[in-house]
Every structure is written in structure tokens, then in C-alpha cells.
Image: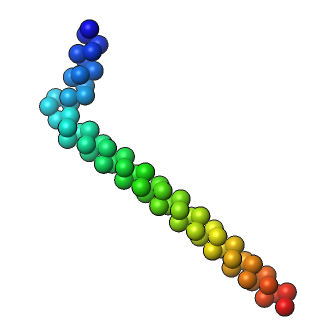
Amino acid sequence: MERDRWVGDFLAMGGYGAYVWSAFGVTALALVGLFGASWSASRRRARELERWQRRVESLDDG
């Protein structure tokens, strides 16, 4: 029973739980969004680099 009370107190964060957990959630969403955007941009740049390399190779051949 004491453990349940401790968990509740921890989640309440001394009355600031709503602020703390919402800030944590917003931060987590921002990090996930940044990771997704970076990953997408990296894949896009890799495809662009491959296209440029094929173009340069075709110019070298002919």
C-alpha cells in the first residue's frame, strides 16, 4: 500500500505533475519529430547523391 502512495506522489510531482508531464510529453514529441525529419532528409540526400554519382559516371563514360 505504501508503494501505491509513493507512485501517486511521484506522478503528482508535488502539485506540478500536470506541468511536468505535459512538458515531458511535448519534449518527447519534438524529439521524435526531429528524429523523423532528420531520417527522412538523410534518405532523401542519399538518393540525391546516388543520382549525382550515376550522372557523373555516365558523363565519364561518354
Instruction: State whether residue 43 is above or below residue 28.
Output: below
Residue at 79% in and 81% down:
57
Q: Where does residue 60 sit, x and y in percent of width and height?
A: 81, 87
Snapshot quadrant of residue 50: bottom right
19 on left or right of 24: left
Residue at 75% in and 83% down:
56
Q: Residue furthest right?
A: 61
3 on left or right of 59: left
Snapshot quadrant of residue 7: top left
Colour mode?
Answer: rainbow
Q: Where does residue 41 sit, x and y in percent of width and height?
A: 53, 66
Residue at 53% in and 59% down:
39
Instruction: State whether residue 6 is above or below residue 48.
Output: above
Q: Quadrant of the N terminus?
A: top left
Residue at 42% in and 55% down:
33
Q: Residue furthest bottom?
A: 62
Q: Residue furthest top?
A: 1
Q: Where does residue 22 sit, x and y in percent of width and height?
A: 25, 43
